[in-house]
Amino acid sequence: MISLWTVTRQELLSTWRDKRTLSSSILVPLLVIPLITVGLPLLMSNLIGGQKDRQQTVGVVGTLPPELRAELLGPTGHNVRLVQLEHSKAAVQSGQADAVVEVKTPLPTQAGTGQTGQLSLYYKVGNLKAESGAAGKVTAAVERYNRVLVGRKLHSLGLDDSLLTPVKLQKVDASNPAESSSGALAFIIPLFLLQFILAGATAAATDATAGERERSTFEALLATPAPRSTLLLGKLLATTLTALTAAAFSVLGLTLSAPLALLLTPAGQGAAQKATQAAFGGSLQLGLGGLGALLLTAAASALLISALLLTLSLFARSVREAQTLIAPLSLLIVLPATLLQFADFLHTSPLLYTLPLVGGMLSILDTVKGVLTTEHLLLSLSGNVLAAALLGAVAVRLFGREGVAFR
Amino acid sequence: MLNIQELGKDYGDFSALRSVSLQAYGGEIFGLLGANGAGKTTLLRLLSTLLSPSRGTATVAGYDIRTQAQQVRRMIGLVSGGMGLSDRLTGRETLQYFGALHGLRPAQTAQRIDILTMQLGLEQVLDERAGGFSTGMKQKVVVARALIHDPPVIFLDEATSGLDVLARRQLLDLALNLRAPDRLIVYSTHVMSEVEELCDRVAVISGGEVVQTGTVQALIADTGTGNLERAFFEMLRRQQEARVSKA
């Protein structure tokens, strides 16, 4: 009796000696995930935070009240640099100023005169640098100036500032710890996981089928007494294990992200940095149960993707041709994964969890958010395993055809 | 040991093998001589159960290729000219894998590797990955892979194609050394000199049919020519004439 493991072991040996497989299954997931979940937020928070610390140039067209000028310059005089200009829009467009304030009629210097002044702010709307820098600082300075004027008026009338805010609204985060730490961009995690599974499985599946054909080793293999179903299932198992390795290293990359984030941004980490990082899922918290569910879902997805890739690769004459056939498959992952960002707006019926691949993605998202139910996990596992079994049967049938070695 | 009855293979309207009947016995090196596209490879692939026949049948070492494919594959060793190796495996790993696929225990495989190392001079290739092998070294492992289970029937299909003079000589010597009373070697080629040197009997194949079978000397005598090459072309000419008159 020729064991399945004999074939699997040989395929794994051959696959793991390929440097491309090592990099796509281990190095890339281990490096890319922390880079995205920790490095990118760090970069963004440094950029945004940097704008707050940096001095921008704000142009002034017209005359500002001295008190508002003082607000704009800030307590140390380094908040913004004010320059007198003639034209507002042109100065912003030419880069002469980061923002321009334009005063057409004199602004009030006290509240309650029955007069509302009009101050126009020119800047590039939607430009992150302008929004978080000059425009943000002007907006804050004008708000402070308004508050000072109103407060002064209230005091002159013998009233307190609290008159302006009879009710204070306090926002409290009601999400569970996993949900709140998963971040608003948690939907990216299923995309990462499945893409790395696809990358790992692609190298193994194409090598085990089209690669054999390209090297002219199929004929010798099929001339042995090993049943073709054993050969194919051995290849399927090896492909799945390779894909699962990629998934395991992706999960490892995710779990390493949180300590790495702490290491890179210790005690002094600012609130803006923390918020940006949390939004990207950099402080993901997975318990043992979550980790188990994630690995189970990844295993079922790896099995399905491997069966699909093996089936397709059987039609190819060379590894290159197989890769061309497989390339559009990444859309099967990218499209539903992109839609996951709207998952909160959708009524996710249990039936959705039975959909091959999609169910797995939903389960991964739920796991990351800490809201996965056993029923949903079982449904997604069943959907993926059943589809993998069907595709596996198709692959065994194709592999049993006489032309398989001589395509 | 080999009994073929009206074996044929069609691909749609095209007949790759029309109808072949022949017998070959243990102790023989039996030649299949024909030009490219004559049907030799199709015949060997049918006998190796890699292809299914469209008509007729054959037994290899007593097993029917239609109904006992797995037993047939236990009895054969197949070497084809274009066969390759996995570049990432060493010679020993390839042989161990194929030993396991043939159901040999690790100790049996190790013993066979020792024997084949002596027969084929595998010392250089056993523990090196095939990626760095010369064509001759590769061919040695390909042959060892086909012989790892010590099969009673060996099919060598254009096995010297692409080999340099030295590697070709080694393969021909090996074929001669492998000759044994309980072993049949079927040697398929289009090279006349190889047939003259190796084969006890020859079947000349053309257009998917056996034109004539016999010893090299008998074929030469029957056609009244001086050598095998002339005899070969004479046989093809007669076949063509017969077809025209039949039409």
Image: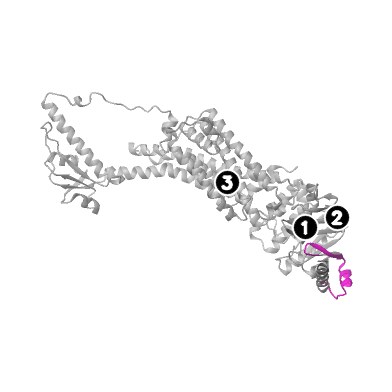
Q: Find residue B3 and name its label.
A: 2
- Nearer-the-camera pick, B204 or B147: B204
Quarter of image, res A345: top left
- Against A98, is A113 above or below? above
Considering the image in quadrants, where does the C terminus of chain A appear? Answer: bottom right
> Callout 1: residue from which chain?
B
The answer to whether the residue labelled 2 contacts the one labelled 3, judged by CB atoms less than 8 Å apart, is no
| Front disc: 3 or 1 | 1
Start-end of magenta stretch: B205-228
Q: What residue type is labelled 3?
A: Ala
Q: Which residue corresponds to mark 1?
A: B44
The answer to whether the residue labelled 2 contacts the one labelled 1, judged by CB atoms less than 8 Å apart, is no
Q: What element carries label 2?
A: strand
Q: Determine whether, in the image, residue A384 is placed left or right of residue B110.
A: left
Quarter of image, res B192: bottom right
- Nearer-the-camera pick, B151 or A87: A87
Q: Find residue A201 and name its label.
A: 3
Q: Which amino acid does label 2 sit on?
A: Asn
Instruction: Answer few, some or many: residues within 10 Å of disc 3's Cα (few below 14, many 20 plus, some between 14 and 19).
Output: many
Q: What element carries label 1?
A: helix
